[in-house]
Amino acid sequence: MDRYAEHRQIARTLGVDAVALVPGPNFARLFHQDFHSHERPLVVLIPAEGAPAALVPNLELRSFDLLKFEGEVFDWRDQTGYSDAFAALARHMPLRSVAVEGQVMRVFVHHAMALAWPGLKIVDAERQISGLRLHKSAEEVAALQEAINLSERALQRTLDQVRLGQTEKDIERILTLALFAEGAEEQSFGPIVAAGDNSARPHAHARADYAVKAGDALLLDFGGKWGGFCADITRTVFLDHASDEAQAVYDTVLRANLAGHAVTRPGVTAHDIDDAVISVLEASPFADRIRTKTGHGLGRDVHEAPYIMRGNPQVMEPGMVFTNEPGLYKIGAFGVRIEDDMLVTAEGSLSLTRFPKDLIILR
């Protein structure tokens, strides 16, 4: 079996000589191992036909051996630089055109390739290459489920420890420690822990100088990684009490979230799901607080295809995973977001997230 068959097909479909992969989620999917992206370029070339080849920093050679790579490897050292290694790779594999990961390959690597292969046509194939990750296997869904399970346990640990007077940073530290205590390999992303007016900023940063107080909304958006896969969960709770307005906003967001669950099945589009969710928000008295689309794909990256938004004709198929995360945000006051991780199944859909969504008031 040729483990490069999918990438070779992309090259043939696009009419290019090869596909280039760099460290990142697509690399990890293929080789089941990843490398840091730093000042040292590492590139694997997969031609439409024939053996692959790679350019690898010398200090990574022993780690690269673990990939059981089938082709020639051209290494280089910091002391000499990578230009000669790129030139040697170009002599070994003459190319006229190559498909690259447009959202992952860094500009200096692009330039190094253009210099090594004069006149090289470089094609952005991000959609095609990352599209290989759209459908999760049973093993990948199991890894996602474990990432979500441990994240939900960490959330419960955190909520059990929240007290009035703690700062957002205090709560962020509790959450981070809880994730690792529950078995996370790393965090999916830097967590969002936002209270009061900060919760109205969809991508807020925790403050060290704000102590949570009675009546505050407390929004936690976070996730742990397991088996290389990311959880992404949001729950919004209230401290001591929730005002009538807060309860009405929460109920609206929850109804939008549930509408997303109800409509998701094979054959509907990303547009259909977003339209069902956003329509609930638009029909409410809080329509002026809509600031985001419904969600995004989830897997090895915390944000990947499919993007759940109006205008996206992507048809949902079994094995696709995405976030369902409607929210309403009143600048200067508070925000509410409820986020689940959804799997499209042959029969319909399944929420991999099971943490309760009834309004929680921490007392």
Image (cartoon, rainbow, N blue to C red):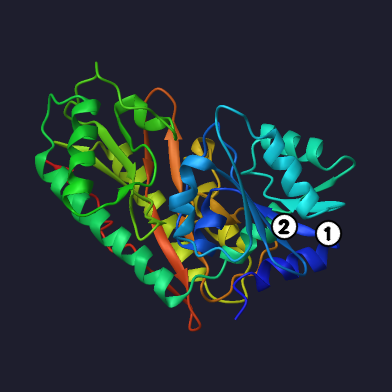
Q: Is residue 221 positioned above or below 229 on the image?
A: above
Residue type pointed to by label 2: Val
Q: Report the residue at 77% width, 70% height from top.
A: 49
Q: Is residue 122 positioned above or below 145 on the image?
A: above
Residue 16's mark?
1
Task: Using residue 94 as the reference point, say whether residue 133 is left or right of it.
Answer: left
Where is residue 321? Give x, y as percent.
Answer: 49, 64
Residue 19's mark?
2
Residue type pointed to by label 1: Val
Q: Residues within 10 Å of mark 1 (few under 14, many from 20)?
A: many
Q: CA distance from mark 1 to mark 2?
A: 8 Å
Where is residue 16? Give x, y as percent.
Answer: 83, 59
Looking at the image, which is closer to me, 133 or 8?
8
Task: Using residue 205 as the reference point, say whether residue 28 is left or right of it.
Answer: right
Q: Quadrant of residue 351?
A: bottom left
Q: Report the residue at 70% width, 62% height from top.
A: 313
Q: Is residue 266 positioned above or below 70 on the image?
A: below
